Image (cartoon, rainbow, N blue to C red):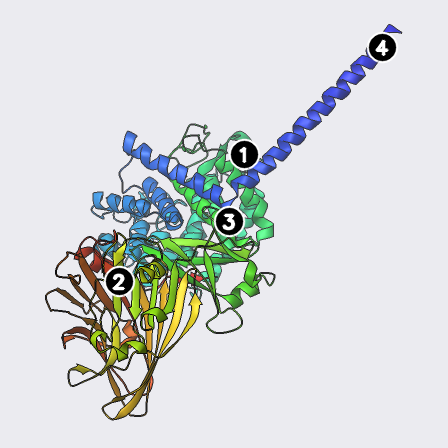
């Protein structure tokens, strides 16, 4: 009886332990899956990339550089930092790389034809594309010009220091070809890319095993075997190749005659690499004998993850076929990052598989990690249920409050379930909704969706347009007719205030004015209603004032017919129409009745667009007339001609900076400017007490320009140079708009 009781007790205990173990395994499984999914959230990817990148720069600052800054090890790290800098929206990383270039005097390693020694050339070329400084690529271009003239006919057998003349080892395919390829992209000269392609296929014919679809490191490994009897294929070596493949494809035109060969090799290698992934998500140091090197290795894993994700993003690999491989590889990489941001499990510099530990790291591993993260970030965003919008800033300037426009038809094509009242824009870097506005342009159906972002120099940002509950956005723009003040039309945003005068003012002989009036404020508040209600806006009560004189001039930026050195002004506007009114953009029309211009009747419609965060309006003045031509003047008044004049023919703008109105009180300085798109083909001139752009309309038509103002007490422009810097950069942005893709 006692034995039966004891047996029952054992069975009960074992049953309880079994359920405990099952519950624990279930918890670990669920937690692991949730953790992996969390690692793949776009904001999590950004967080861990920043953490790792910052650790690397901090370690270099505190512990010094192990190798020269021109070395291939650092070149691979720079490639990753460029990729990270592109999506980080923080020019700090570009600036650090520029400092490296300066330290190197934009030079390369000492051996002229050794691929490792010009690996850094790819970074120099990428920086040149942003900053357009010829110094960045001058020395590299000189070396590349020599490389492309060599016959490159030697055997790749590993003798007689062949590596100093040919790409005789697989690592070289990450160092050399992308450097030449990016130089072609930077200069537009295809000879560098063509040479890279020719030499790639020479190396491939020698080192690529067509049965295994893997690369030998060099000829010394053709006959070597791993402990398990398989061929020796080094993980990082093939990682170099895969990384080099996608970087060549990145810069190779779609119609290049060799592109299909590269794509075919990439697809074959990708299938092979995916099949060799280990259960921990990584690739061990030896691809065919992972058991002999049982610990994950992150430099090879990083390059593989980078290449596979790039292939998915560019349509060469099917997402469903590779999503688990890529997700598991990213988990393997993320779990190798120390709490302080250090990346572990990076095999030391070498040429074949070696064991590695959690504490081992090196700069090229971090480069691979950042390259992988940048592509996996893009890949994850593309899987969201909505429209992924890519915004590229090709210039070396920061665009603050940059308005981005997205076609409503494109949004509907991406997801027809997105309704007008439910469309939102998400910033994946933060996961937060950002203000947006539908633009109807007088139509029943939306034409575009707009939103704004601060886009740093040379960066590429992503935004997700999807269905969701729209938050209550505070409007940063406002405009209205002011019937209580002679039908003024006043408008503003969080930076500036303007007004144009109504026809009622024409009946007031003592107060007539024709041009555009500028008001100054130092608050982001919308002030028009409060200032008109107070009816004392020529006095500063703490937020600003109207301290600008207009009279019979163009004021702070307008247009008028022009003949014999004189403006021929219309009467003030007689009717208006508000087209869009916030929260991001204001658009309105002012209509002017016909007036006589040297014997012909002319009418005008002025359309003004003002976006939040900008000091500049976009203005289109449409003139209708029956004659054959109409000379126009577009510009700003010089008041008493005692201010500072700027006529910039290179950037196509005029600016005037002078004392604000009121001789009895110091009301500061006012800057006004007009920026002309190159398409307007105006002649800049200083005449008729104005700074002008002169243009003749040969038929009824329009002229478009940007007009804006600044106050030295607004908090944004303390001096004229601050204003001119803003206007010049604004003009650059007009000439080279952001590149929006979806």
The image quadrant of residue 566 is: bottom left
The image quadrant of residue 129 is: bottom left
In-front residue for pair 350/158: 350
Question: At numbered mark 2, what does the secondary structure look like: helix, strand or loop?
Answer: strand
**From the viewer's perspective, is residue 517 above or below residue 298?**
below
**From the viewer's perspective, is residue 15 above or below residue 116?**
above
For marks 1 and 2, the one nearer the N-term is: 1
For marks 1 and 4, the one nearer the N-term is: 4
Mark 1 Cα shell of 10 Å, populated few (<14), some (14-19), many (≥20)? many
Question: At numbered mark 1, what does the secondary structure look like: helix, strand or loop?
Answer: helix
Cα separation, mark 1 vs mark 4, equals 50 Å
Answer yes or no: is residue 217 visible: no
Verify CB contact (< 8 Å) between mark 2 and mark 4: no
Percent from the top left, x then y, of residue 537? 26, 61
Question: At numbered mark 4, what does the secondary structure look like: helix, strand or loop?
Answer: helix
For marks 3 and 2, the one nearer the N-term is: 3
Q: Nearer the viewer, mark 1 or mark 4?
A: 4
Q: Nearer the viewer, mark 1 or mark 2?
A: 2
Percent from the top left, x then y, of residue 209? 50, 48
Percent from the top left, x then y, of residue 321? 60, 50
Question: At numbered mark 3, what does the secondary structure look like: helix, strand or loop?
Answer: helix
In this figure, which residue is indicated by the disc labeled 4? 5
In-front residue for pair 325/660: 660
In-front residue for pair 310/20: 20
Q: Residue at point 34% right, 70% down? A: 489
In this figure, which residue is indicated by the disc labeled 2? 519
In-front residue for pair 606/71: 606
In this figure, which residue is indicated by the disc labeled 3? 308
Answer yes or no: is residue 22 visible: yes
**From the viewer's perspective, is residue 50 above or below residue 139?**
above
- Quarter of the N terminus within the rendering: top right
Cα separation, mark 1 vs mark 2, equals 72 Å
């Amino acid at each position: 009886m006692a034995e039966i009781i004891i047996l029952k007790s054992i069975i009960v205990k074992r049953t309880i332990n079994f359920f405990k173990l099952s519950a624990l395994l279930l918890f670990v499984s669920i937690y692991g899956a949730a953790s992996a999914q969390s690692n793949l959230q776009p904001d999590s990817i950004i967080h861990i990339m920043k953490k790792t990148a910052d650790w690397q720069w901090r370690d270099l600052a505190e512990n010094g550089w192990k190798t020269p800054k021109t070395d291939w090890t650092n070149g691979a790290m720079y490639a990753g930092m460029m990729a990270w800098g592109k999506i980080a929206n923080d020019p700090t990383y570009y600036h650090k790389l520029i400092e490296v270039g300066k330290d190197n005097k934009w030079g390369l390693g000492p051996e002229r034809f050794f691929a490792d020694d010009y690996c850094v050339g790819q970074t120099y070329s990428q920086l040149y594309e942003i900053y357009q400084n010829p110094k960045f690529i001058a020395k590299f271009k000189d070396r590349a010009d020599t490389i492309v003239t060599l016959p490159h006919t030697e055997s790749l057998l590993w003798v007689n220091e062949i590596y100093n003349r040919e790409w005789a080892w697989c690592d070289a395919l990450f160092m050399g070809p992308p450097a030449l390829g990016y130089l072609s992209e930077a200069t537009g000269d295809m000879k560098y890319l063509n040479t890279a392609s020719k030499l790639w296929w020479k190396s491939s014919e020698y080192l690529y095993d067509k049965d295994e679809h893997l690369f030998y490191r060099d000829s010394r490994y053709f006959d070597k075997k791993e402990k398990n009897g398989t061929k020796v294929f080094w993980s990082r070596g093939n990682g170099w190749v895969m990384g080099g493949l996608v970087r060549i494809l990145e810069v190779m035109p779609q119609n290049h005659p060799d592109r299909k060969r590269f794509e075919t090799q990439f697809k074959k290698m990708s299938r092979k690499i995916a099949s060799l992934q280990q259960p921990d998500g990584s690739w061990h140091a030896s691809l065919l004998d992972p058991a002999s090197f049982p610990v994950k290795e992150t430099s090879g894993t990083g390059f593989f993850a980078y290449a596979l994700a790039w292939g998915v993003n560019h349509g060469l690999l099917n997402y469903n076929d590779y999503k688990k491989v890529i997700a598991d590889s990213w988990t393997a990489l993320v779990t190798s990052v120390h709490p302080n941001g250090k990346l572990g499990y990076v095999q030391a510099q070498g040429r074949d598989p070696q064991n590695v530990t959690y504490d081992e790291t090196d700069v090229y591993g971090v480069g691979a990690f950042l390259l992988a993260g940048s592509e996996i970030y893009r890949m994850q965003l593309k899987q969201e249920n909505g429209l992924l919008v890519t915004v590229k800033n090709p210039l070396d300037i920061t665009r603050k409050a940059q308005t981005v426009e997205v076609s409503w038809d494109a949004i509907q094509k991406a997801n027809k379930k997105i309704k007008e009242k439910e469309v939102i824009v998400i910033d994946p870097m933060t996961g937060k909704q950002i203000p947006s506005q539908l633009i109807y342009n007088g139509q029943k159906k939306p034409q575009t969706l707009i939103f704004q972002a601060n886009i740093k120099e040379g960066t590429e940002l992503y935004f997700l347009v999807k269905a969701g509950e729209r938050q209550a956005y505070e409007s940063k723009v406002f405009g209205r007719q002011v019937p209580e003040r002679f039908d003024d039309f006043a408008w503003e945003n969080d930076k500036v205030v303007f007004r144009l005068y109504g026809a009622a003012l024409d009946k007031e002989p003592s107060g007539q004015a024709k041009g555009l009036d500028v008001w100054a404020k130092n608050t982001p508040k919308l002030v028009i209603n409060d200032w008109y209600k107070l009816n004392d806006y020529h006095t500063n009560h703490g937020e600003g004032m109207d301290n600008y004189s207009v009279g019979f001039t163009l004021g702070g930026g307008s247009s008028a017919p022009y003949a014999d050195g004189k403006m021929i002004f219309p009467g003030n506007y007689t009717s208006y129409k508000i087209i869009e009114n916030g929260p991001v953009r204001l658009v309105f029309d002012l209509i002017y009745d016909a007036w006589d211009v040297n014997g012909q009747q002319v009418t005008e419609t002025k359309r003004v667009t003002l976006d939040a965060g900008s000091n500049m309006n976009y203005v289109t003045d449409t003139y209708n007339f029956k004659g054959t031509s109409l000379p126009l003047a577009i510009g700003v008044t010089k008041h008493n001609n005692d201010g500072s004049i700027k006529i910039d023919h290179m950037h196509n703008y005029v600016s005037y900076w002078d004392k604000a109105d009121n001789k009895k009180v110091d009301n500061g300085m006012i800057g006004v400017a007009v920026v002309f798109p190159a398409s307007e083909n105006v002649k800049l001139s200083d005449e008729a007490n104005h700074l002008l752009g002169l243009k003749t309309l040969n038929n009824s038509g329009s002229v478009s320009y940007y007009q804006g103002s600044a106050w030295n007490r607004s908090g944004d422009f303390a001096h004229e140079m601050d204003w001119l810097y803003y206007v010049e950069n604004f003009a650059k942005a007009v000439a080279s708009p952001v590149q929006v893709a979806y």
